[in-house]
Image (cartoon, rainbow, N blue to C red):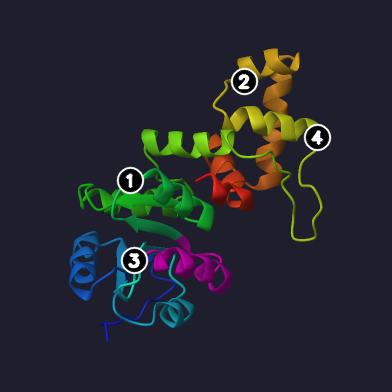
């Protein structure tokens, strides 16, 4: 069993859960993260991750794409974590930055992706960025997400009761947003003023509880089941 540390919610530190593909690499990652005293780290590599997460309620979970020798099992665990500990934000640890892996990670609900060939010291910065509510994604990886949206059928963003979250015009603005267009370009396409587009974007962010275009891209992908066939 991996060593478990008692996590105190009131100590001001960021609670991090690590679940890597092997206990050895999990310990290595945990040791690097522990060098930052603002992080309280639990290594669950080789353990039952879901019960551990439900007990500890981590702020950030770092999950390998492969667990227990099963390729892709980390993506399924991520979906289960979202249901069990919805406030936990997840970073997927990928063996490579391959397009299908990046898209699948964000579609499954990840807030960031970190590749094994990235400098491990950057993982500390990644954890803090995701904890602050930002996404951790590189320029090329963002292009993968944009391409995935551009080649998939249009969607309507719905809530749990199948009620549309956005108006028809807001849906149009979202479509242009995820294709990477500027406010000025969207205004020209829709024959509206740039200020009107800014107001639409503000309302979209407010309705979706987001603050950036990248978050809209990630959310739209997660709501598009048919995109799995095009990834």
Q: Is 50 part of what is drawn in magenta? A: no
Task: For the residues labelled 4 and 2, say whether their Cβ atoms are less than 8 Å apart.
Answer: no
Q: Is residue 145 left or right of residue 30?
A: right
Say which residue appears at 39% left-offset and 57% top-offset.
91
Give the residues drawn in magenta, as a range: 71-89
Q: Is residue 39 left or right of residue 171?
A: left
Q: Is residue 15 visible?
A: yes
Nearest to N terminus: mark 2 or mark 3: 3
Q: Is residue 211 visible?
A: no
Image quadrant in which you'd find residue 149? top right
Look at the magenta stretch and give its main secondary structure.
helix
**Dot 4: few (<14), some (14–19), or many (≥20) neighbours within 10 Å?**
few
The mark found on residue 8 in the picture is: none
Counting every numbered tag in the picture gives 4
The mark found on residue 183 in the picture is: 2
x, y percent for residue 99? 40, 43
Q: Which residue is mark 1?
A: 97
Q: Which residue is mark 4?
A: 168
Q: Is 75 part of what is drawn in magenta? A: yes
Pick the front one: 220 or 38: 220
Mark 2 element type? helix
Q: CA distance from mark 4 to mark 2?
A: 18 Å
Say which residue appears at 58% left-offset and 51% top-offset.
222
Quarter of the rendering occupied by the N terminus: bottom left
Nearest to N terminus: mark 3 or mark 4: 3
Q: Is residue 128 above or below residue 141?
A: below
Say which residue appears at 45% left-offset and 38% top-offset.
144
Q: Which residue is mark 3?
A: 66
x, y percent for residue 84? 55, 74
Mark 1 element type? loop
Nearest to N terminus: mark 4 or mark 2: 4
């Amino acid at each position: 069993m991996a060593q478990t540390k008692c996590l105190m919610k009131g100590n001001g530190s960021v609670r991090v859960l690590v679940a890597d593909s092997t206990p050895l690499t999990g310990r290595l990652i945990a040791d690097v993260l522990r060098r930052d005293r603002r992080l309280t780290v639990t290594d669950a590599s080789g353990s039952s991750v879901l019960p551990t997460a439900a007990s500890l309620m981590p702020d950030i979970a770092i999950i390998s794409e492969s667990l227990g020798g099963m390729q892709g099992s980390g993506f399924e665990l991520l979906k289960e974590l979202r249901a069990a500990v919805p406030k936990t934000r997840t970073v997927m640890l990928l063996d490579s930055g391959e397009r299908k892996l990046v898209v699948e990670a964000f579609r499954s609900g990840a807030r960031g992706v970190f590749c094994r060939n990235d400098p491990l010291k950057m993982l500390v910065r990644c954890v803090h960025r995701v904890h602050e509510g930002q996404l951790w994604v590189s320029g090329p990886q963002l292009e993968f997400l944009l391409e995935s949206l551009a080649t998939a059928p249009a969607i309507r963003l719905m809530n749990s009761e199948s009620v549309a979250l956005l108006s028809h015009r807001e849906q149009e603005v979202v479509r242009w947003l995820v294709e990477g267009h500027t406010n000025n370009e969207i205004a020209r396409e829709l024959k509206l003023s740039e200020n009107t587009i800014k107001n639409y974007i503000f309302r979209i962010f407010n309705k979706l509880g987001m603050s950036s275009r990248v978050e809209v891209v990630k959310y739209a992908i997660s709501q598009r089941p048919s995109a799995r066939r095009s990834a």
